[in-house]
Structures are given as C-alpha cells and as structure tokens.
Image: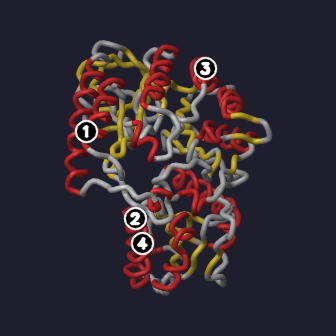
Amino acid sequence: MKIFLKTHGCPKNEADSRVISGIFRDRGHALTDNPGRADIAVINTCGFILDAARESIDSLVHYAGQYKKENPGLRVYGMGCLIQRYHHELIKEMPEIDGWIGLDTLEETADFLLDGTRKKQIPIVPRPIFNRCPETTSKTDRVFEYVKIGDGCERSCAFCAIPTFKGRHISRAPADIRNEVENLIKAGTREIIIVDQDITQYEYHGNTLSALLKTLDAIEGDYWIRLMYIHPDHIDDELVKTVRDSEHIIPYFDLPVQHGSDRVLRYMGRKRTSRELQEIILKIREEIPGASIRTTIMVGFPGEGDAEFEELITFMEAIEFDKVGFFKFSMEHGTPVEEMKLKAPPRETADERLEEIKNVQEAISERRNSSLLGKSFKVLVEGKEGDMTVCRSYRDAPEIDGEVFINNCQAQKSEFITARITQYSEYDLEAEVI
C-alpha cells in the first residue's frame, strides 16, 4: 500500500508523523510524496488555535477534493489534535472524509488507517504518546529530528486549550526514548531536539528530566541535543547544571515567558513574577556564559493596557533575549480566560503593539549579534543556497531562528565545522571556515 502523509502544526506532530511513517514501513508499506498515486492520504492535523485549525481543515478539503478527482480510489483520513478536539463538528460537516482518528497511540493509529472498514476512532481518554519507535533504521538526509518524550499537559495557563483535548501529561519510558535517539544517531541524524508540551513535566517512575538527559548524553557519537519548551515557572537548578555539565546538550534555553507585566502574568495563570523570571535568566547566564535564551511573547491578552505593555518593553530591554517569537492573543473555546471578565485591547491596538515590540527586539537581536563578531563557533551544515553554505550554531534552532552563511565552503551536509563570524544582522550571521 502507498501512503501519503501531510503534517500540520508543531514539532510534536512532526515527531508523531516520523514515527508512524516508520511503523508503516515496518509493516511493508511505502510512503509517497504524490497523493495522486497513493492508496490513502493521511492529514495529521493541528487544533491549537483557530488559525491552525482552519489550515488543517483547508488541507482536508483540498486532498478530499482535488486528489480524489484525480485518483478515485484514494481514501483520505484526518488524524490528531484537531480531530480529537472537534470530531463532532467535523464528522457532521465533512462527509467526504473517509475516516477520523483522534489522539491514540501510534500503533493503534496505524491499525486504524490501514483498516478500510472503520469510519472513526476517538479515544475518550486521549493517548497522545507512543511506547516504542519503529524498528526500521535507514540512513537519513535530515540533519535534525524531533523526539517526543511525553505529551499532554497539566499546567494552568489561562490562554491554552491543550489540556482540554490532549488530557493529562504522560511521559514515555526512558529506555524507549534512548532507543529512538540511538537509532536516529546511527542513521546519521546530527541534532536531536527534545520536545513535549512542557519538558519539565517529564517524570517516569522516579526518573526525572535531568536523569533522562544524562542517559541520552551518554550515547556515543558526534551530535547535539537541543531542549525545547521549558516552562519558565518550572525550570530548576538541576536542569541548568545538567546542561552545563553535559557533553552533547547544547546551552540553548527555550523559555516561553509570554509576558513581562506581573498583572498580565497573573491573569495568564503564570506563577513567577517578572523579577523572578529575570533572576532565572541571569542565573543561567552566570552558570553557562554564552547560553542562548529564546522566548515567546504574546501581546493583546485581556487585561493588557498601555501600562502593562510598557512594562513588557522594559522587561524585554532588561533581559535582552537572544531570540523571540511573537504572537497575538487568540481567544480559544474552553480556556480559563474565556470565563474571566477582562477586556482585551482592540485588534488594531494589538497589531500596533505587535509591530512595536518586534522593532524593540530587532534592535536587541542586532546588538547581541554584533557581540559575536570575530568569535568562533562549532556549526552544523544544513545545505547549500547558491554559492553559500547554510549552517546553524547552537544558538539557533532549525526552522525558527537564524542561520550562519559561509561562502566558498566545501563542507557537506550534516558535517560539524568551526567558523568565525565575519558579519551580522538582526537575524543571520556570515562566517568563514577556520
């Protein structure tokens, strides 16, 4: 059987798609990039916010429309977060879709997708993690891969609907995670990116996140481990020291603080104050000089007035984050903020604040990048763009951060090389091989 797989949403979905693709191959099926020649098309959906849901729905409509006309035998399935969250509405409104499966283990999901008789399978209790990785270990041309160590969430962020459809957090067994990471490294992967809704929730029969990371760090090979989604309310000294003392875990801290006003942080359901957040980041930089700190900032949250927005700017200028992703608040059904009697700023105001805060960060990023001029870094080669070799240092996560460009470089994809920074901008760097 030929299977086409389209993935929407976050890196956790990408990890799921990679694993289920391996399960298909283990069972003797082939993956294809051409839905017109596939037996089934599987759309791995996202239901995090309304815009993401619309994108997934558009994809379902597209593949069930255009490609079914070209390939009448094609069966189109929706799977994942959007299906778990909105299956009642989707099943009613989209009869052209051949089957629906929510958040189930990937073995069960594969069983469902390969069985042409069932129309839906929506677990009452979501099962968003897998307990093993595929047996197939083939050489890869991908430089990095996402590895999911758990899923679900028990945090109380007022703006987030994830706990309503992913359920309680579940951690994967350390042996399964280590086996997956070892297989990926043997296959040629050079960067392992650890993901979860919040990796600080990890706990498996007394095994802490730091214990897991030490186990992964002990795997032989030349590779990086990057940590994503570290909840700033729950990062602790043990994790910082684990990163500091490791051989393979790079000093990159993804801490989505969301805001810098104590009032807004309290409305968001966050525990630590802006001062406490500053102290945590200062401690990281003291323990690990050169650590790269990334965050996400949300503007337009209910209760954010002019004074709170000015506090956010002051907060950002005080910390000087290395990397920032910006978002406008989106009201999601079923979230705690929906019940709060707080007035959100007008859309136009939120738009203006978003542009203003982006400009603030651009100046900060350029200033921080300027301090790298003349310094040397180990960089990972990702490929070529014309005459330029595209690389990344530990400071930059793939697909979201900047890149390092080197001219007249003979290094090949997936190689680690050492480069000296020669030019900078607010986002990217240029370098020369040394």
Element at label 4? helix
In-front residue for pair 117/152: 152
What amino acid type should be assigned to the residue bearing mark 4? Ile
Residue 95's spot in the image, x, y percent? 49, 87
| Residue 265 higher or lower than 36, as above or below | above
Q: Quadrant of residue 387?
A: top left
Q: Which residue is mark 2?
A: 50
Residue 239's spot in the image, x, y percent? 61, 27
Q: Which residue is mark 3?
A: 241
How packed mark 3 is, by other alpha carbons closer than 10 Å (few <14, some 14-19, many 20 or more), is some
Q: Earlier in the sequence, mark 2 or mark 1?
A: 2
How packed mark 4 is, by other alpha carbons closer than 10 Å (few <14, some 14-19, many 20 or more), is many
In-front residue for pair 363/375: 363
Q: Which residue is mark 4?
A: 57
Q: Considering the image in quadrants, where does the N terminus appear? A: bottom right
Residue 309's spot in the image, x, y percent? 28, 40
Q: Residue at x 40, y 32 (%)?
A: 396
Q: Which residue is mark 1?
A: 357
Q: Earlier in the sequence, mark 3 or mark 4?
A: 4
